Amino acid sequence: MKIELPHARLLLSAAAPAGAANPALGDLPVWKLQDLYPSATSTAFVADMEKAGKAAIAFEEKWKGKLAEAATKTGTEGIGAALKEYEALDDIMGRLGSFAGLTYFSDTTDPANGKLYGDVQTKITEFSGHLLFFALELNRIDDAVIDASMANDPAAGHYRPWLVDLRKDKPYQLDDRLEQLFLEKSMTSAAAFNRLFDETMAELRYEIDGEKVPLEVALNMLQEKDPDVRRKAAMALAATFKANIRIFTLITNTLAKDKDISDRWRGFEDIADARHLANRVEREVVDALAAAVREAYPRLSHRYYKMKAKWLGMEQMNFWDRNAPLPETSSAVIPWPEAKDTVLSAYGNFAPEMADIARRFFDEQWIDAPVRPGKAPGAFAHPTVPSAHPYVLVNYMGKPRDVMTLAHELGHGVHQVLAGAQGALMCQTPLTLAETASVFGEMLTFRALLEKTSDKRERKAMLAQKVEDMINTVVRQIAFYEFERKLHTARKAGELTADDIGELWISVQSESLGPAISISEGYETYWAYIPHFIHSPFYVYAYAFGDCLVNSLYAVYQKAETGFQEKYFELLRAGGTKHHSELLKPFGLDATDPSFWSQGLSMIEGLIDELEALDRA
């Protein structure tokens, strides 16, 4: 067990300079972390920390070396009882870790927050050391004995999905002492470099017209209508990344080598196999997805960016023009109450229960929306633990993309609330399916807004923005995945220089973006700010997986007469209890079928077709 970082969706979300609050946005909510603990010094927090430590030691004393015998018993002496105790420990440790993590993400530059986060990580790692034996010992029990235990002991049978899932890790487990070493050393290896990246990135500033601004602000300027503002922001980003490239190169080299060592000791064949195992998805399925997207580059990103260059009056766009607004795009600020109503209305039209759950995030202060110095960039939904509730972080400044990001993260939140009924051990959805509800929530919101739009210019702007978001989610993320594959492969041969990494980055970006975009000097450092490469190697394909899956799922929804919503909610409630093949079967979908990915990509192509038709009309 460890504190899991939320997987931030680092998009080009809007932001404003610190202290430049926009009154047009209305009152932006700040999350109420007191639902977890009143404070880090509160009686409840201190008591739970002490309770977790003592309970972990007691659990080890009670069960270590006795699980094989317990597998032949039922009741309070059986495997089911042990699992129930283990799950309760997982929940309390997760609550402690979530509070420390969310406090830290509220302001990563506050030394007190960093100390709390580091201290709690250390304690939880220590507690986890007493629990490490559990999964290892369970996996040493003969399969037939475990099967019999699940059949004869109702408590063990309840945890069947978790136990079956656990067996998949068996070939890659090491002996107990090595696993203990890996766990304890993680604090001074991967976890330490993850934190170094976060704190370095949070403190960096980018000088634009004499003003030093944080990352969110600089990225947001790439969406400004004025091309000179976009150019200045791009050059400021490039200059700061270059000035700090040595530290990002060191972090990247170290983490890639750390992963290589772990993979080698565990016996993973491919550099991404550990991620595939964690996602419970077959390598062949991901390979098929990546191949389908690469093959579609000319029909999607190349074609769209060529059209966009023409709309912007350019022969070729600069790399900083990629997310520039079209002339038709409204510059009006969308107040927070309007964003809330837009998302809840779209959710409610699909299923009232979905809107009811999402509304709780607003009513009960589960959302943190304002831009603040030191606050984590981008957006995420963190599930915490089933005994509590999820939290959503966004950096809201009133642009249409911010509304879509809100819809995305609330989709995660609804999913996490529904899956929470599975309990702490089985509520976590594999990353490939974790993006299902979020992308579906975005699609519902987009379609609801599009149906209300009759003006041709507004419709074109909306369609273009949706296409760009889908290209960013599918094409860009697969390009990120290909970059990671090249980087981790090259790292096996020796340490990489910043120039080496930059060349790999430019090679995949050129291929994915196409000839309509000029990649000039400065862009070779832009790999440095992507947090997924640091926190979750190879995570990025989950976005493309989720987007294509939802495109196919939405096509089924459009054709379905009745019953779709019930099946959809069953998918969300399943959490981590079912494989993607089981979850998609009721919808007639199969991710192992090559045509599945083509169907998902065809929806993006169809939107580009519609844009082209609007342009001709």
Image (cartoon, rainbow, N blue to C red):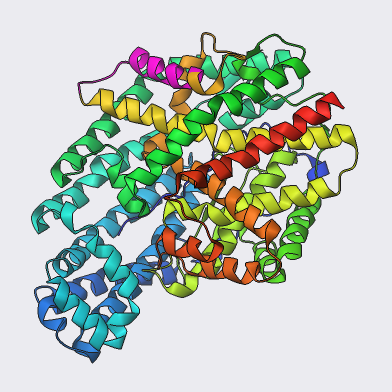
Q: Which quadrant, please, contains the C terminus?
A: top right
What residue is shown at x 15% (from left), y 82% (from top)?
70
Q: Give left or right: position of 372 versus 276.
A: right
Q: Which residue in the rendered view is the most extreme toward the right?
A: 455
Work out whether residue 77 or residue 389 is closer to the camera in this orientation and state it. Answer: 77
Q: Does residue 336 show up magenta in the picture?
A: no
What residue is shown at x 16% (from left), y 81% (from top)?
71
Question: Which contiguous range is marked in magenta?
Answer: 493-510
- The x, y position of residue 62, in whole percent, is 15, 79
Q: Quadrant of residue 291?
A: top left
Is the residue 155 above or below the residue 400 in the image? below
Q: Which quadrant, please, contains the N terminus?
A: bottom left
What residue is shown at x 57% (from left), y 44% (from top)?
600
- The x, y position of residue 464, in whole percent, is 73, 32
Question: Is residue 140 visible to us here?
Answer: yes
Question: Is residue 369 visible to us here?
Answer: no
Is the residue 248 above or below the residue 580 in the image? above
What residue is shown at x 36% (from left), y 72% (from top)?
47
Work out whether residue 597 or residue 342 is closer to the camera in this orientation and state it. Answer: 597
Work out whether residue 153 or residue 387 is closer to the camera in this orientation and state it. Answer: 153
Q: Give left or right: position of 278 versus 528.
A: left
Is the residue 507 above or below the residue 191 in the image? above
Q: Does residue 504 show up magenta in the picture?
A: yes
- The x, y position of residue 176, in whole percent, is 11, 58
Principal secondary structure, stretch drawn in magenta: helix
